[in-house]
Amino acid sequence: MHSEIDFGKIELAEAPPAGEPARQQYFMERLREVVEERSRKYGRPLTACIQTFGCQMNAKDSEKLLGILLQAGFTASEDEASDFVLYNTCTVRDNANQRVYGRLGYLNSLKKKNPHMTIALCGCMMQEPSVVEKIKKSYRFVDLVFGTHNIFRLAELLYRCYTEKRMVVDVWGGTEQIVENLPSRRKYSFKCGVNIMYGCNNFCSYCIVPYVRGRERSREPEDILAEIRALAADGVVEVMLLGQNVNSYGKTLDTPMTFAALLRQVAEIPGIERIRFMTSHPKDLSDELIGVMRDCPKICRHLHLPLQSGSSRILKKMNRVYDKEQYLALAKKIKGEIPDLSLTTDIIVGFPGETEEDFEETMDVVRRVRFDSAFTFIYSKRTGTPAAAMEDQVPEEIVKPRFERLLKEVQRISAEVCGKDVGKTMTALVEGMDTHDPALVTGRLSNNIMVHFPGDASDIGKLIPVLLTESKGFYYMGKRLP
Ligand code: 5AD
Ligand code: SF4
């Protein structure tokens, strides 16, 4: 099927430029020729489907990947029975890997029905050599594998895949390169994630992210601000600044700058009404940042501040660089300065060596801080991380009941905390229609809690004042105000 297309002619036309992004622009054009040729042959548009696993970073990467595919002439589809299917994978916990392997079996069955189908895998999981070996050996129907550092090269890689007629694998160990100005297709018209930095230098002992996302690199503030100005001009009202540890933004720039200073500049951009950010490491959350959050109403009343464990002994083994008392003091200070702030967290249960006493310390912090919500995880051993080599791994039969106890406590507190604003009027950004009731829309409050209230599709993307009439535990019902 490949051989009927005259790729030689395309290749001979001109040599690809060496510099970026010109090189990728060239390959998007070349790929477009191939896509058009195939569309003509099949008598229909070529469809592409991207499935995203994992975090906001991956969601953002997927918008970039889709932008490239649309530029190359593909039609976007939600259906995995597409001509090109790309899984953007996560590997932060082993169950993320298992989900991908499970779904690959299903993709193989689809490919048997549509031999034109091309299957690609990218993202964090592909940065692990053992995964790539397994794919090469046992998942031969996969056509393309690439990692986290070269997603900007999708057009070039897919073009190679179509022309070389064999599995293409291109995973980079790391990069200093930040390629700007490639297309991107936003999932929402009114809100958008913006990368402010890539990679991570923290090396928490359980975490695989520094190994799969590489060293920390901050984008130049001018590039970030230009991107946000362009988004505002295009109707975006809410931006989410993305980084593994936004609090260390700017430290490695030629002209260093703080994250708080960046926030202040973003807040000055006309049209941007709301600013969120993800994720903050407690070890370097500055007073300057707390001050900017307090004084700038555009910065959302939400802080995600991963605790991981409440035991100082375990935090030390995790290499988190703060202890229980420091975390408690920080949470108290933030709540004191910004009382209406919603504080959320991540907690790991069953880190190697965790005793019942250590676990009780975590429960103690949960009860004292009273988080608005908490993501709770069972520790997952990630090969290559220091924690994986620790001797005292905690058996599952001990971890599971602890996890259940923590979850119950977190949910009980969060239901109490989240109902506290009933009777208040707050502004909601309408994100979409309510999935259960067509007479309602779903909006997000500044503190990240959802509210459902009467409305229609014309409200989507608008900021609307809403009276919170009833708490449903984790969300509100509301009444719109004129
Ligand atoms: N096991 C369990 N949870 C983990 N996280 C990161 N690595 C692991 C691991 N090995 C959690 C942390 C982090 C969140 C994104 O995922 O809580 O904050
Ligand atoms: Fe995101 Fe980390 Fe998962 Fe990669 S491994 S997708 S950075 S959560």
Image: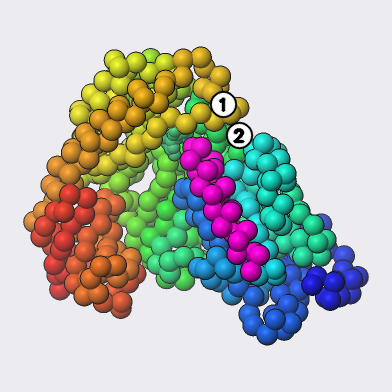
Q: What is the x, y in percent for residue 218?
A: 57, 43
Q: Are the two marked residues, 1 and 2, in contact with CB atoms closer than 8 angstroms?
A: yes
Q: Residue at x 72, y 46 (%)?
A: 136
Mark 1, other Cα within 10 Å: few <14 / some 14–19 / many ≥20 = some
Which residue is label 1 attached to? Answer: 385
Can residue 228 be seen by looking at this rendering? yes
The numbered mark, 1 or 2, whose residue comes first in the sequence reads 2
Residue 442 place in picture, x, y as percent: 27, 65
**Residue at image coords 55%, 33%:** 208
* Apparent side of residue 334 relative to residue 380 in the rendered image (left or right): left
**The CB of the residue at mark 1 lies under 8 Å from ligand 1:** yes
Which is more toward the observer, 292 or 472? 472
For disc 2, the neighbor class at 10 Å (few under 14, some 14 to 19, many from 20) is some
Q: Amino acid at mark 2?
A: Tyr
Span colored in magenta: 85-113
- Does the magenta segment cover residue 105? yes
Residue 178 visible in image: no
Q: Amino acid at mark 1?
A: Thr
**Which residue has dot 2 on it?**
211
Percent position (x, y) of residue 464?
23, 68
Q: Is residue 460 left or right of residue 108?
A: left
Residue at (51, 28) in percent of width and height: 381
